[in-house]
Image (cartoon, coloured by chain):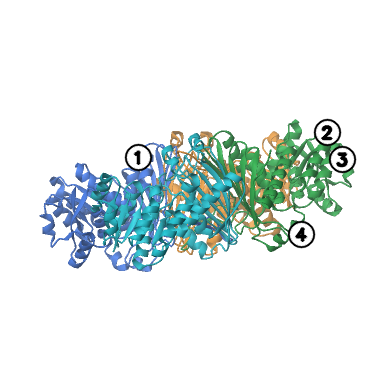
Chain colours: A orange, B cyan, C green, D blue
Amino acid sequence: MVGMAVLGCGRIGRLHARNFARHARARLVAVFDVSAAAAQQVAAELGTKSARSLDAVWSDRNITAVLIATPTDTHVPLITQAVKAGKAVLCEKPIDVDLERARNCWSDIASDHPTVMIGFNRRFDPSYRRLRERLEAGEIGRLELAVITSRDPAPPPVGYLKGSGGLFRDMTIHDFDMARYLAGEITQVHALGANLVDPEVGKLGDVDTCAISLRARSGALLQINNSRRSVYGYDQRLEAFGSAGMLQAGNRRATSVESWNGERTAAREVVLHSFIERYGQAYEAEVDAFVRSVEEGRPMSPDFSDGLEALRLAVAAEESLRTGAVVNLS
Amino acid sequence: MVGMAVLGCGRIGRLHARNFARHARARLVAVFDVSAAAAQQVAAELGTKSARSLDAVWSDRNITAVLIATPTDTHVPLITQAVKAGKAVLCEKPIDVDLERARNCWSDIASDHPTVMIGFNRRFDPSYRRLRERLEAGEIGRLELAVITSRDPAPPPVGYLKGSGGLFRDMTIHDFDMARYLAGEITQVHALGANLVDPEVGKLGDVDTCAISLRARSGALLQINNSRRSVYGYDQRLEAFGSAGMLQAGNRRATSVESWNGERTAAREVVLHSFIERYGQAYEAEVDAFVRSVEEGRPMSPDFSDGLEALRLAVAAEESLRTGAVVNLS
Amino acid sequence: MVGMAVLGCGRIGRLHARNFARHARARLVAVFDVSAAAAQQVAAELGTKSARSLDAVWSDRNITAVLIATPTDTHVPLITQAVKAGKAVLCEKPIDVDLERARNCWSDIASDHPTVMIGFNRRFDPSYRRLRERLEAGEIGRLELAVITSRDPAPPPVGYLKGSGGLFRDMTIHDFDMARYLAGEITQVHALGANLVDPEVGKLGDVDTCAISLRARSGALLQINNSRRSVYGYDQRLEAFGSAGMLQAGNRRATSVESWNGERTAAREVVLHSFIERYGQAYEAEVDAFVRSVEEGRPMSPDFSDGLEALRLAVAAEESLRTGAVVNLS
Amino acid sequence: MVGMAVLGCGRIGRLHARNFARHARARLVAVFDVSAAAAQQVAAELGTKSARSLDAVWSDRNITAVLIATPTDTHVPLITQAVKAGKAVLCEKPIDVDLERARNCWSDIASDHPTVMIGFNRRFDPSYRRLRERLEAGEIGRLELAVITSRDPAPPPVGYLKGSGGLFRDMTIHDFDMARYLAGEITQVHALGANLVDPEVGKLGDVDTCAISLRARSGALLQINNSRRSVYGYDQRLEAFGSAGMLQAGNRRATSVESWNGERTAAREVVLHSFIERYGQAYEAEVDAFVRSVEEGRPMSPDFSDGLEALRLAVAAEESLRTGAVVNLS
């Protein structure tokens, strides 16, 4: 049994807490939030305790590992403290919005044999996972092109956007990780961006729509397109094209109902709007993979360096957006 | 080159005439219609002549074969005359609405080595044909169940219905032929029918909706469902289920466009409404198969007996409708 | 909170026990099985107690309701005892394989104001449920035709088949309930059956493949087709066709991956094989509906009479199979 | 009736010649090829004459318009001579591989009131056309993102590649035109390219795989991806995403058959391999639009400037490929 503490009792923290609470080989020892009330509510719901302080978490010998789902700017100190306290860590993406700060975090903890997983939930989506397994098994030969489509149902509130680090570090970072998941190391990044959805985004100097091209060391070319608003739901698709075929993984809907009438045929429902639903199975599988790695002392995947690399691609995309030129990564 | 005459210049006659006119190995020698004006119009359009009389057709040595697309009650005398005149025949379904009369027709011509194809156009639909080839090739093992869906876009005018012979001889006859095309000889027929679409149909003692069960000598069970009205277009589907899998063949649309919005996703257009469009490729392939069989002196398929068998199933279905009991065919 | 006991700790009993154990408004008070070891194992897993005897269940005032997942021939006595003990009941289908016995059960308990739900799980499948809601809302006008496809991945062992009551009472009973769910009261039943899958089934005098036609009092015609073996998984589909359109609900797969290569395109995975997976969401929703009805004292749906009616249709189908004639239900 | 001459009797010339020959309002007056034998063969097949020389075409008063399907390097002189001779022109794409030469061609003919259509066949594909009509009608609001997928079944022979002008001028030029068809004027181009399919392509200094990003003056971002080899057929897709939804148009197959077995389900056939089949309807519609514009004296679309613009985008993409930077078009 892996003794867990969940730090941060917001929407995503609660989701993880529930998954740990019902996991067969994990025990939810404590939850923590700067709002004691929030933590107590979750603790009550899940029959666990609410930690009085972070120090109480670090010193609790029943706690083997922590899940960090606090605001982004606390990730670095919490990872550092957790590692120093000998805890394994599952930290929500991104490590930080600042690449230098994230790198320094690694410098600080590297000698402590850190066991850190970064929560790139999509790697655990059953469809994406299956697609990649079949790709790795050689089903479509060598990967030559990939198209990653990722469109949020609606832009987040302006308040969130201000601290988000911008489209690339906040949203596209998932797609950068997907690109690496499919194609390995990325050597070139080019980005076009636009402010088409919400003028408030533009006022923040940010974009809400983008078209990104990547080149992988393997030779493969990849395209990412993002929008902060998709009226038909949370549009999440992968297409991998290779010398011997193509694999696609698509959207999910609540039901399989199709309707036919005098206007249209075979019409499906809108796709799931919420990432909670869309990636519900992924979150469960992520927690399971983390628990298993902790139990078996195996390396984490995705690990800290995956978190750094995705952030590095986001930073490179920003540079490309400014200069118009492709950015070469060595 | 096969010299052709087309008898009957209505909608379906004109369609066939055009297909013969542009066929590489056929020559449209003449067209005929009881309305000389109708015949002359088609002749002018296609650069052929309008025959003055049927006798002129029978005696024309340039005419090797005739296509009969006249009203159903003329099929039997025209088939007989054509065969007696030594012409090959492609006759639109049904041979006749009266099974006895159709059988007598055969008795009259059997000794003349008749070369007769009955125009069950669906046997020539590329999708149905491919499905059957793959079935015959053993792809799904032994056929165990089949579902034949056939729904007209809208009921024909009452005037037509009166002389149509009823739903089973007019419309379901195609599905009975499809059943035989897929499963071979049919040994049992059961039919439920209802008048749900148009009260006028009921006044004629006819049904416009049906659910039919068949058993084939091979052991396979088949289901047919029909409606005289489908608001989303001409719904034409086959499903063949066997010990090793399933094959389906579906509808056709004018374009491949799909639409996604806040109400629905992946919505396709309505399916083609007109049998002329839906089975356009089938009509061309039918004419081509006929020409080839005439040229090569090969047996026709579907032939006169296929026309008789489909009619026999329609008659059996009517009996089942009256009695409620399954009808055994020996 | 609804205090629950689960009777029968086989595969389906355990599934339900887990669903009750994690239900927010239910408490799993006890589990029972004739094998004390089986019960103790489930009790240990779910942190509940294993009841020593049925009497201990009936007399336990913390137990408000019971789930009956024992062998079919015990359903009637257990329902009766549970009702007499004042418990609400959720009983797996069928009530009994014998219609007379099931009716007598009702006579025995009717005066006790029984609260009984029969476990027709498919009524709680999100896709079927949505289809029916949209049908009820008038989206496709009046229901005219329905096609219910239901094919098991593989025939059960011969041992099971012997006590199963035959294809219609064991498997098709779900489809009879679906027919009633969609179209209401059924007035005519006709059945064709065949033994195509496994000769052992034929030796038992049973069939493993069938084609059934139904007429509803509403006028609608329905078709059911069943097979005991579908190599591509558990094939479960509904099609409802009406005056203004069509609704379909289809199969489920583990992932959304599609593959394209030189042989085929857009190929999906096989559909889920296990009813546990296919109807996993349905089982959860069923338990939830039951708990809510108990809590709120509302009538159950599907209730005892729905169980009787489905069984009556199965018996009628058997009669039709013997006689070849349609069976009229008054 | 529009009197037509077809110049060039290769594969595509013959295709057009047949379409003109059977067009109701066109008359195929002559065909021409530098190989008199090739021209005579087509003339014989279609019942027209083979012109002895180009001068004979220019001076023939029965010839109103010409279709140019000769090798690319003859397009400019033939367009010029045809316009000077007062003929309307339908010229296969591209105008020329050299942008300067194409522009000079326009300078030479501009004062002659030229009537020139450039053969961007995809604009006439029924699915693409319908998609654009619905886009223009506002169905998905403002266009924000588009993805254009275009993958040839197999690379052309090296001999062809040498004179092709490279991937962007030869193949992507169609996609550049599609981008303009959907989004209007393009202001920025960025291209990544790779040589993944055939080493011979790389030896020619060309690429066979690309990922291109475009920005339109309207604000929309577009992505194009190309490959010279797609094992599952000629992959041709459009996706247009906007503020109110998405429209997609997809591939075509010879039949609608789907297969289900123990390995996979709902598998379709490979998509059509040949552009002749894939765009067969488009070629017919193109010829029809040309004939109608000639008859009615209406402006051509796509016209000479559309040909120039697509070429300009191809040249810009090449520059981007060299420099890595986005190319701004004024």
Q: CA distance from mark 2 to mark 4?
A: 36 Å
Residue at (68% x, 63% y) in the render: C199
Q: Is residue B18 left or right of residue D43?
A: right
- Asked if the residue under mark 2 is in contact with the one under mark 3, i.e. CB atoms within 8 Å, the reply is no
Residue for badge 2:
C112
Q: Secondary structure at mark 3?
A: helix
Q: Is residue A13 visible?
A: no
Q: Secondary structure at mark 2?
A: helix
SS of the residue under disc 1: loop
Dot 3 or dot 2: first in sequence order is 3
Q: In 3D space, how far apart are the residues under numbered discs 3 and 4 (Cα atoms)?
A: 32 Å
Amino acid type, callout 3: Trp
> What subunit carries mark 2?
C
Which numbered marker is on residue C58?
A: 3
Q: Image quadrant of residue D73?
A: bottom left
Where does label 1 land, which residue? D218
Looking at the picture, tell me which residue is in the foreground, B319 or C5. B319
